[in-house]
Amino acid sequence: MTEPALEARGLRVRFGTRDVLRDVALALPPALWTAVVGANGAGKTTLLRALAGLQQPDAGAVWL
């Protein structure tokens, strides 16, 4: 098994008192196409911003 190209564990982002992301965990292997799908307001953009380092998570960590 190869090392993940991107990994997140326990990712949490809050806006005020509202959890936008709660306990997100994922590991993406290299050269894998991935789609993020969900309803409006589901946290897709917040997740991508946290993974890219543009949004500071309140808990958890992201590794590249």
Image (cartoon, rainbow, N blue to C red):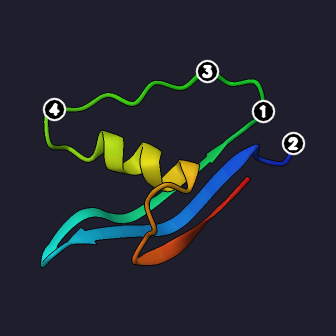
Apparent side of residue 29 relative to residue 40 in the rendered image (left or right): right
N-term-proximal mark, 3 vs 4: 3
x and y percent of residue 42 in the render?
Answer: 20, 44
Q: Mark 4 falls on what kind of element?
A: loop
Q: Residue furthest right?
A: 2
Which residue type does callout 3 highlight?
A: Trp
Residue under circle 3? Answer: 33
Q: Residue 2 got which mark?
A: 2
Q: Earlier in the sequence, mark 4 or mark 2?
A: 2
Residue reaching furthest front? 54
Q: CA distance from mark 2 to mark 3?
A: 16 Å
Looking at this view, is 45 or 28 the one in front? 45
Of labels 2 and 3, earlier in sequence is: 2
Residue at 87% from the left image edge and 42% from the top image edge: 2
CA gap between label 4 and label 2 equals 32 Å
Mark 1 or mark 2: which is in front?
1
Contact? badges 1 and 2 (CB < 8 Å):
yes
> Which residue, given by chain and number where applicable, does mark 1 sit on?
30
